[in-house]
Structures are given as C-alpha cells and as structure tokens.
Amino acid sequence: MAIETGAQMYPAALLEQRVAAALRGAGASEGSLAAATRAMLHASLVGVDSHGVRLTEHYCQMLAGGRLNRDPQLVVDKRAAGSAMVHGDDGLGHFAAYRAVEVGIELAREAGVGAVGIHQSSHLGAAGAYALAGAEAGFITFATTNTDSMVALFDGAARFHGTNPLAFAAPVPDSRPWLMDMATSSIPMNRVLLHRSLGLDLPEGVAADAHGVETTDPHKAEMLLPLGGADYGYKGAALAGVATLFSALLTGTTLDGDFIPMYGGPGGDISTPRNMGHFVLVVDPDKFIGRDMFGMMITRYLASLRAAPVREGAERVMAPGDREWETLAQREHNGVPVDPDTARFLGL
C-alpha cells in the first residue's frame, strides 16, 4: 500500500541512514540492525509501507523495553540433509530470517531443497524481503510466519488467526525476480494503524468492529477480515492456517491466539519475548530441471502471461512483482513517502 495523504518524500539513502541510527541508538547490534534496516527499506521501496520504515519506532520501543535482545547470538541446528532450525535468541526477527535464507541456500545446494524453521524470534516484517533474498541468489524461495490473533475466521465474530503472510519468489534471467507477497487477511493490521495516522477511511470489506460487524472507520476496527471477502473468505482463513502449520506447529512455537500482542496489549507488556516462529523453504532449480532450463521456461512463461488478452477497459495484465518493481523505480527516482509520525520520530 502506498502512503499518500500527509506524507512527504525522502531519499532512500537518507531513510536508511536515519533508520539504522535510530536502531543503533536503541542498542541494537550492528548485524541485527543491518538486517532490520534492509528489510524495512525493501518494504518501503516496493510500496509495502505498512511494514516499511514506519516500524522503526516500534522496534526501538521493544529494544528499550527488553522484549528484543539487543545483541542476539543466532544458533543454527542442522537436523538433516535438507532441514535445519535457527534459534533467533529473541532478537529482531529480520536478523534470524535472513540467516535462515542463507542456511536454506547452503542446504539446497547439496540436497536440492532447504527447509528451515525459526524459533525464539520476533516480528518478521515483510515476508517478501526474505523470499526475494533467496531469489536474488538464484533460488526459488518461500517465506512465511504466523502472527498474533487479529483476523476473524470466515463467518466468525472474534479474532483467531494472525495476518499470516505467504511470500514466494523465483529468479528470472536478466530481470527482477518473480515475487508474490500477500497477507492471508484482507489487509495487514499495520495498514489500519497507518490509516489512523493519516486520517483515512478503510476500504469496505476489510475490517470489523468488536462485534464482528464490518466497518470502514480505522478507529473502530478491532479485527480484520480474511482474504476473499464476504463470499470467499473461507479461502483466506484456510491459507492463514497454512502459515500457522509451518511457522508454529512445525517449529513448536506460539499459536496465533497465544501471542503477547505486538504493541503490548492492555497490560503494556513490552519486556517479555514473544517466541515467534517463521519458516523458509529454498529450492535449487539445478537439482530439478536445471538452472538454465528453468530460466528459459520462466522467461517464456512470464512473456506469455504479460502478452495475455486484456479485458475491455484494462491496460495490461501484470505478473506478480511487476507492480512492486515499478514502484521501486519510481521511489528510487522520486523518493519514498513517509507518514508524519514516522518522519517526526526519524527527525526528518
């Protein structure tokens, strides 16, 4: 989601500098703050502003409160030829997630696939950042996490799943990767908070009040609705369960409904670690059809997709990632929009 009303534009290099400085000032180690800055800048540059630099203040608060370990020591436990676990040591989740991608690549080079669970971690940020990291290294990559309960089930009237994103990316020769990064909820909760900050109404059919009744008022929104809307929300609710299956059940971490709320909740607890789980799967095309043949086939596939007939009134069809890469080019040239609250925190 692109920030519009009330936002000002800033160069990405300046934002990178200010974000890193803020995290450093909060005591984060150089390795963990570099990972968090990288992931947040990715999100802001491709238009996922809800998970971009606006989260810097939150992470700084969690570092100050003790929830986040300022100097996490990641531990990799290889379980089999193609599987491993990464212990996040309660640090910034971005640090553990990028390490999991690296481990997955190491495993996939040997076994063809590398499946890596992450435990004792924290908020992941934009899952697409990690899928992209694997794809840029030449590997098909999947990344997911479960999050604290804030999304109603289909026909439900209470929070159950988290927003539980699913992200996939694949390398494309001489081009940006194919990239899909989606929440299994209608929108992320961070987008509700962003709309509150900007004073904007929510779209219809994406959020509900405390009684499960749909609302467009971001200040009344107490829960999100699953992807698919009133008629097909059972699909989004089921996909949210996929994230929980891989990220919590397979790693032995925290179920959606058992999380301490991301922002502290009624008790304001920002000192207790949340033991979040994430999951990364890396696939080496060389161990299947071969890297060259895969590259030829995905190039052909994407050319065919983009040349598909267009319905009346539409300009063109787009492959997953096309919109993000266009946004990236625009923001690298024109600057990144930043909401007023974040701009103030970063001293912009």
Image (cartoon, rainbow, N blue to C red):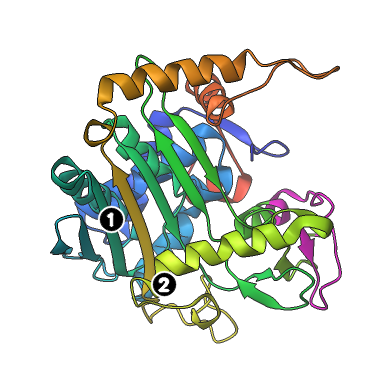
Amino acid type indicated by mark 2: Ala
Residue that badge 2 annotates: 248
Question: Is residue 213 shown in magenta?
Answer: yes
Q: How many marks?
A: 2
190 in relation to 128, above or below: below
Residue that badge 1 annotates: 115
Q: Position of residue 28 (x, y in %)?
A: 27, 59
Q: Magenta residues, as a range? A: 195-217
Amino acid type indicated by mark 1: Ala
Q: Position of residue 200 (x, y in %)?
A: 78, 48
Taking the image as drawn, is residue 241 in sight? yes
39 in relation to 234, above or below: above
232 in relation to 135, above or below: below
Question: Is residue 42 shown in magenta?
Answer: no
Residue drawn at x 66%, y 16% as measured from the top left: 308
Residue drawn at x 65%, y 64% as measured from the top left: 237
Q: Is residue 82 left or right of residue 148?
A: left
